[in-house]
Structure formats: C-alpha cells, structure tokens
Image (spheres, rainbow, N blue to C red):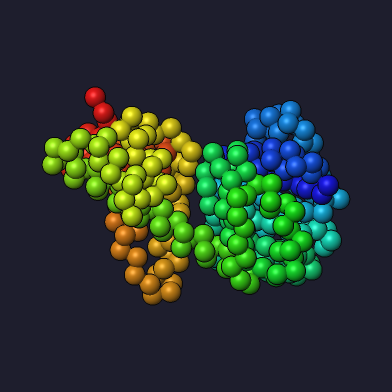
Amino acid sequence: MTQIAFLGLGTMGLGMVKNLLAADHSVTVWNRSDAPVAEAVAAGATSAPSVAAAVDGAEVVMYCFSNDEAVRSVVLEAGGLASVVDSSSIVIDLSTISPEASAAEREAYEAKGVRFLDAPVFGSRGEANSGGLWIVVGGDSEVFDLAKKVFEPISETVHLMGPGGSGVRMKLVGNLVVASQLLALGESLSLAAKAGLDLKKVLQVLEVTDFRSPIFDGVGPAVLADDYSPSFALKLMQKDVGLIQDFASGLGAAVPTVTAASHYVNAAMDAGWGEENASALIKALADESGVSLASS
C-alpha cells in the first residue's frame, strides 16, 4: 500500500482516485471545489482541507488539472505544492499542459530535491473510470520504476518517453492525431451526407477498413445520434489545439490539420458548445457544409 495525495478531482481525477483505492492504496484528496470530494470520500479516500495537509506524509503526490493556469496556481504560487511538498515524495503531474509550464514546475521541484515525473494521460472520462488510460511519461528511469505501482491501477499501458518534458511533448503529438481524426470524421460524414449516402452504412465501412479508428467507432454513432454529451469537453480541446499550435510554431513544424481543426473548434465554441464533447467541432463543420448529420 502506498500513501498517495491526489489533487484535482475533475473529469479525470475522480476516476483515477477510485481505481487507486480499489488497488488498496491509501489516498488523501484535495480539490478546489467541494462537490467531487464527497464522492471520493464515499469510495474510501480521506479529505484534506489544504494542499499542505493533503501531501503531509505522502509517498507519492499525483495531480490532474485542466490547464497551465491551474497548475501554476496550485503548484508555483506562494504556499503552493512546490513549497510544501517533502523531498522524500515522488510528484507526478498527469495534466495536459504546455512544455513551458511543465519545465517551470520541474525546476521548482528540482530546487528542493523532489523527484518529478511529467505523465499526461490519453483517454477521457470512460478510460479514467475503467482504469484504461494510456500514460506517457518524462523523467528519470529509476523514478519511473518506483512509480509503476501507482500507474498500474489507472492505466492500460505506460510509456517512458525519455527525460523530463518528454511526456508533455508526446501528449501534444498525440492530441494532434485526435484533432485530425475528429476533423477527418466530420469532413467525411459531411461529404457523404451531401452525396446522398446512408451515414449508418458509411460508418459500417469505416469500422472494417484498414483506416479504421476507435475514435471513428466511438464518435461516429454518437454524431448520428446527435449525442455530444461530454467525456472530453470542447473547451479543453480548444486549449489543447492552442498548445499544439504554440508548440509546433516554436519548433518551426507545420501542422496544417491542427490549423484547420482550430477553425471549427473556435466556430463550435462561438456557437456555445464549449461544455459539449470535443466532437462538437463536427457540428460546426457540418453546418458550414449545410447538412445535418443526425439520423432522422
């Protein structure tokens, strides 16, 4: 059993906490809002009134926040995690943030001699709840080996990508593929609808071809059902697309698909769909084509 402090109980965090508890780890939780804390406590977690109280005595500190600003607020501000965590702890950031923000927190931890892994996750609410996330990690290999015991209950696979910062960079590379596949699905369904094809039959073909995709399999039927209930919110996709563009620009890399996806993400946000699933960008694309993709 490992003494874990887990900070951040949003879309992803609460499911991860439940799986850590199910694996017989001891988990103390802290969240900026109270609502999810009661559910974590009901599952067996202990609630802490502050970050400092949560990490007191923790062997491993894990957290998952929505953006750079949240990480900076909780970790780097005066009295934040970097200033109160004990040097004996291993700290693991599971958030999807910019390489710059990750580097800033790494520097703060290293100044205190704290071992740190950047370990963002692929997957959404369903994978967090089922313990089926895919984790990409940057950091020291010996620290990674020590952390495997807390990665295993929350993941299907874990990949050490290289030294510090490699995890966050891989996450942005992977999210580029996600944005591209959502865009491709929207384009293909809109074109098929304009061409008069049966969209259910179109999806049947996409399910069996050599270019099939689990994203197509999951999102396609939901689009036809006009179901955009969030497992990964569009507003978070907008944040991620911006991170990818900034990351690529700094490296001089061309990312034309992400540029195109960004247009429809922004249009969907302007339409008021920010709390819907990221696939709502497909609605914006279909609207531009003058078609409805919902089955009658």
> Most extreme residue toward the top, as rendered?
296
Q: Position of residue 34 (x, y in %)?
A: 67, 32
Horizontal side of 208 relative to 287 (left or right) equals: right
Q: Residue furthest right?
A: 57
Residue located at (79% from left, 44% from top): 25
The C terminus, quarter of image = top left
Residue shown at the point (52%, 65%) measured from the top left:
169
Residue 7: image location, x then y, percent: 69, 46
Q: Residue 207 location in percent, x, y?
A: 34, 44
Q: Residue at x 52, y 47 (%)?
A: 123
Q: Residue furthest bottom?
A: 252
Residue 225 seen in this snapshot: yes
Number of labelled discs? 0
**Residue 113 falls in image quadrant:** bottom right
Residue 243 seen in the current view: no
Query: As rendered, which of 289 and 32 lies closer to the eye?
Result: 289
Q: Foreground residue, 218 or 79?
A: 218
In the image, residue 165 above or below residue 43:
below
Figure quadrant of residue 260: bottom left
Q: Is residue 234 above or below residue 122?
A: above
Q: Residue at x 46, y 63 (%)?
A: 173
- Measured as percent of width and height from the top left, residue 11 is found at 56, 39
